[in-house]
């Protein structure tokens, strides 16, 4: 039986499904693999099920001549932590889990939008700290989200799911920046550039994949283009945003607030962001629901099963 390394603990249902086809080793640590562990994994296992933070770089692949590993089934839709070109040169197939994460990630985007627009995090902190002195008409006045204009950078599966919730649930006007036009079952206007989009919206959400092509896609010039009452939301990848530029824009009042589920140097979160009451911070909760994580794991295992049977990977990248 072929050997499989699962690099982090996963739901028991996922592990059981994998064990039907592989001799499975589950690494008990919840932290990313070290470089030494990654090199050893390529030398030791026929298959690897890695996830976010397991940075299989070109250097890692180059350090192993003739790796035993022939397939890597990534747990997650984003796979920018794996150098796919280097993997291919090493004779290793890579897959991901598209679709399984869409709705859960969109839900977190709406959570951040509501919490930031309505100052929910700030209000809860004051209440929990015993500093709430009772209701009055001008307390915690935020932005009413219904009927506002939403801008989405990247109108893929997740971007469309966010837009659909915002339009049908909150009556928001939807605008987007994307390489190609999209046909949807609700009105949405494509805008020529990210900067044009930033100028026109009340809430700007990032929903593009991570990777070299999108690193610092959202920079100081984008924040400068936004309206001063506008809210910025990131549920994609931390490195898409120039975090220093975001902090500067918030401190200067160029934008009214931000809601973040991901960070440029995750898990490190700048003290400057933590100190700001107009920023909602979540610990990468995007897909953190049992049924969603189970679905992601089973999709990854489906790719491993296909490989074991000599079939094409359903979700090859």
Image (spheres, helix red, strand yellow):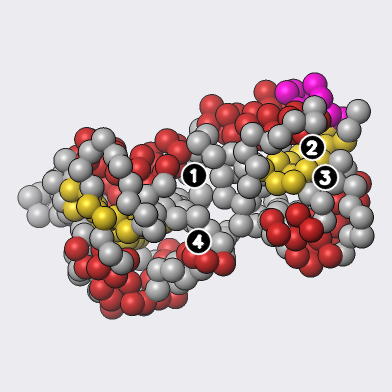
Please give the residue where the numbered disc 2 appears in the rendered image. 26
Mark 2 / mark 1, whichever is N-terminal: 2
Which quadrant holds residue 258? bottom left
Task: Give the secondary structure at mark 1.
Answer: loop
| SS state under label 3 | loop
Q: Residue at x 75, y 65 (%)?
A: 58
Dot label at residue 70? 3
Q: Identify the disc placed on residue 34.
A: none
Work out whether mark 2 precedes mark 3 in sequence or the reverse, and give the earlier one.
Answer: 2
- For marks 2 and 4, the one nearer the N-term is 2
Distance in Å between CA atoms under marks 4 and 3:
29 Å
* Residue range corresponding to the magenta coloring: 16-23
Determine which residue is flagged by label 1: 285
Residue at numbered disc 4: 238
Q: Is residue 220 above or below residue 241?
A: below
Are the residues tagged 3 and 1 within 8 Å (C-beta)? no
Query: Which element is circle 2 on?
Result: strand
Q: Dot 2 surroundings within 10 Å: few (below 14), some, or many (20 or more)?
A: some
Which residue is at 67% across, 23% downward?
A: 13
**Nearest to the observer: residue 85 or residue 109:** 85
Comes first in the chain, label 4 or label 3: 3
In this image, 128 relative to 311: left or right?
left
Tell us which disc is closer to us: 3 or 1: 3
**Nearer to us in this view, 130 or 25:** 25
Q: Position of residue 245 (x, y in %)?
A: 40, 76
């Amino acid at each position: 039986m072929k050997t499989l390394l699962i690099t982090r603990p996963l739901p028991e249902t996922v592990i059981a499904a994998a064990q039907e086809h592989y001799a499975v080793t589950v690494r008990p640590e919840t932290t990313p693999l070290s470089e030494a562990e990654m090199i050893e994994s390529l030398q030791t296992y026929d298959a690897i099920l890695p996830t976010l933070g397991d940075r299989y770089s070109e250097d890692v692949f180059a350090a192993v001549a003739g790796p035993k590993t022939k397939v890597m089934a990534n747990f997650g839709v984003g796979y920018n932590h794996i150098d796919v070109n280097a993997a291919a040169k090493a004779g290793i197939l890579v897959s991901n889990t598209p679709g399984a994460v869409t709705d859960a990630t969109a839900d977190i985007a709406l959570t951040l939008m509501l919490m930031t627009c309505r100052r929910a995090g700030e209000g809860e902190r004051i209440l929990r700290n015993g500093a709430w002195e009772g209701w009055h008409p001008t307390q915690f006045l935020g932005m009413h989200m219904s009927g506002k204009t939403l801008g989405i950078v990247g109108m893929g599966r997740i971007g469309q799911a966010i837009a659909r919730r915002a339009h049908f649930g909150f009556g928001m006007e939807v605008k987007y920046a994307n390489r190609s036009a999209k046909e949807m079952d609700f009105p949405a206007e494509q805008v020529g550039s990210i900067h044009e989009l930033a100028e026109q919206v009340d809430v700007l959400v990032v929903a593009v994949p991570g990777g070299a092509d999108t690193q610092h896609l959202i920079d100081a010039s984008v924040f400068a283009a936004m309206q001063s009452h506008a809210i910025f939301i990131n549920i994609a990848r931390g490195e898409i945003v120039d975090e220093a530029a975001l902090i500067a824009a918030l401190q200067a009042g160029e934008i009214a607030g931000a809601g973040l589920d991901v960070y440029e140097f995750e898990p490190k979160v700048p003290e400057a962001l933590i100190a700001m009451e107009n920023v909602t911070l979540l610990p990468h909760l995007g897909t953190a629901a049992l049924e969603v994580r189970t679905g992601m794991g089973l999709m990854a295992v489906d790719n491993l099963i296909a490989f074991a049977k000599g079939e094409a990977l359903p979700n090859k990248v």
